[in-house]
Image (cartoon, coloured by chain):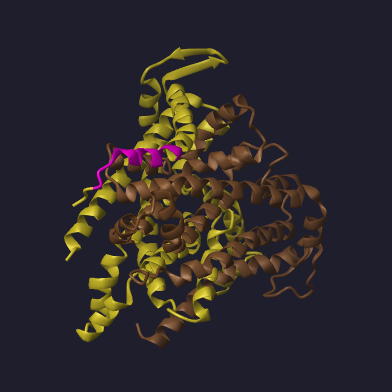
Chain colours: A brown, B yellow
Amino acid sequence: MKGKKKTIFLAIYFGLLFLPIYWMINMSLRTNADILGTLTLYPEDPTFRNYVKIFTDSSWYSGYINSIIYVTINTLISLTVALPAAYAFSRYQFVGDKQIFFWLLTNRMAPSAVFLIPFFQLYSTIGLMDTHIAVALAHCLFNVPLAVWILEGFMSGIPREIDETAFIDGYSLPRFFITIFIPLIRAGVGVTAFFCFMFSWVELLFARTLTVTNAKPISAVMTRTISATGLDWGLLATAGVLTIVPGALVIWFVRNHMAKGFALGRV
Amino acid sequence: MNKWGDNKAWFLVIPVLVFVAFSAIIPLMTVINYSLQDILAPGKALFVGTEWYKKVLHDYRLHDALWRQFLFSALVLLIEMPLGILIALAMPKKGWGISFSLVTLALPLLIPWNTIGTIWMIFVRPDIGLFGAAINNLGVAFDHTRRPLDAWVTVILMEVWHWTPLVALLAYAGLRAIPEVYYQAAKIDGASSWKTFYYIQLPKMRGVLTIALLLRFMDSFLIYAEPFVLTGGGPGNTTTFLSIYLVKIAVLQMDLGPGGAFSLIYFLIVLLLSFIFYQVLQRVGKGEKV
């Protein structure tokens, strides 16, 4: 494809991408009666009533805070344990390495539906029910393997000679890892953090099962309100719009790490 | 080639094993327990051997859900993989366009799954949805709650809208990792853009595309929240995918025995297929190495 065609293709694609989101924003700025009344392409009488309701009702906005807390804990745990493991898989051969790597991945393939009841029993037994850490730990089930997997891919793209040279220069493994290696794969770390954040942020089943009130995530608050008030399309759309905001901020922060790519061979 | 063979590397892996074992092995053992027992009351269970497995394997509704699931995943992969690569190739390589594209692509991925279902439910409704109303105005009768084909079109559209950006983002990260010298070499050799794609970009993207393909396969095969909100598995059972059926058995009807057996079989199918994908892609990759 040539330059101009590319731009047109992208523009059309992004337009289609925005359309359903735009429609939700459109809904969020209207009252329920207005939505059900007539179909208009833009809110003719925009109102922020739905937004005001969410920001002033603590049962609504605490959902956002809870979600952000457990997602952050989960991302930190996932990155901390996955970085050394990914390095091991990328650089060393050890007994059972391939088997362990694949076993880790299998944990992303388990249908979460039936894990619900065992998880509920497990976290009740150890007294972690309705805490942020419970949800963060439960999300490790799929995020830690994913982090190892993505990081391993990025690390294997870095030539081994860099490690060897550093060790000859007298670097210890931890010092080399922190001062040289992690900066080299910062794009990968950014991408991994993004994916951990994303999968933890959008997950609903575990987060809803493991929380009652103290750590209830926004996605659970949304479903509860739908069933309680019938279908308030405007309020629902508003909550949906607001669930995009934290994620959009995160991608804004990691975009440079992704955009720069890696400076392979230009160390 | 590797003279670093070293079992001390195990120490680097131990933290991961502890975390995953805690949240995977213990619950998995509980599920295996369920699948082999008939739980009559708390603390009172009867060992029934493979009874539940036989029951589940002869359930025709499960067979239907399984074929539906295969068709769904196949369609989704066939559309999303090429489209994602195409988008990654079309994305700008420098300037403000990069940030704009990345942020835009990431948007659908960061919306909670039940909200995705809600967005599309609003979007395709014939009365208040832009898509539904527009299609109906063109003279095509469209109602995803009544016509199975329309429901399928809607679910596929939603899935493609939701997840193609993931393929595009991964492919783009892979493209960015290709050193500039490769392109310069291709330019000197006078390679066409198709040849540059086939001989340089595609092989170099193999790692990330493997990740994308496996992720997309697994997640499309385990899909739950979005179609559940959008169609509720209907009309009839025409969009009842495996997870929707599983939750129906295990959580709504609380049939823990069949539920446990079902989920282990389900798990094994995903495992087997992913393993085959993984192996094939590794083979293909080795063949391409020049």
Q: Main secondary structure of the magenta part?
A: helix
Q: Which residue is drawn at 34% across and 43% down?
A: A101
Q: Which residue is drawn at 19% across and 84% down?
A: B189
Q: Percent position (x, y) of residue B276? A: 26, 47
Q: Can you see residue B240?
A: no
Q: In this view, does B66 lie to the left or right of B165?
A: left
> Relative to the observer, which residue lies in front, A111 or A80?
A80
- Total of numbered circles in the picture? 0
* Extreme-bottom residue of the structure: A4
Magenta span covers which residues?
A: B4-15
Q: Is residue A124 above or below residue B66?
A: above
> Relative to the observer, which residue lies in front, B127 or A125?
A125
Q: Which residue is drawn at 59% across and 46% down?
A: A204
Q: Percent position (x, y) of residue B109? A: 53, 60
Q: In this view, does A122 lie above or below A213?
A: above
Q: Can you see residue A28?
A: yes
Q: Quadrant of residue B28?
A: top left
Q: Percent position (x, y) of residue B143? A: 55, 60
Would you say residue A83 sits in the magenta stretch? no
Q: Is residue A175 left or right of residue A131?
A: left
Q: Is residue B77 above or below residue B245?
A: below
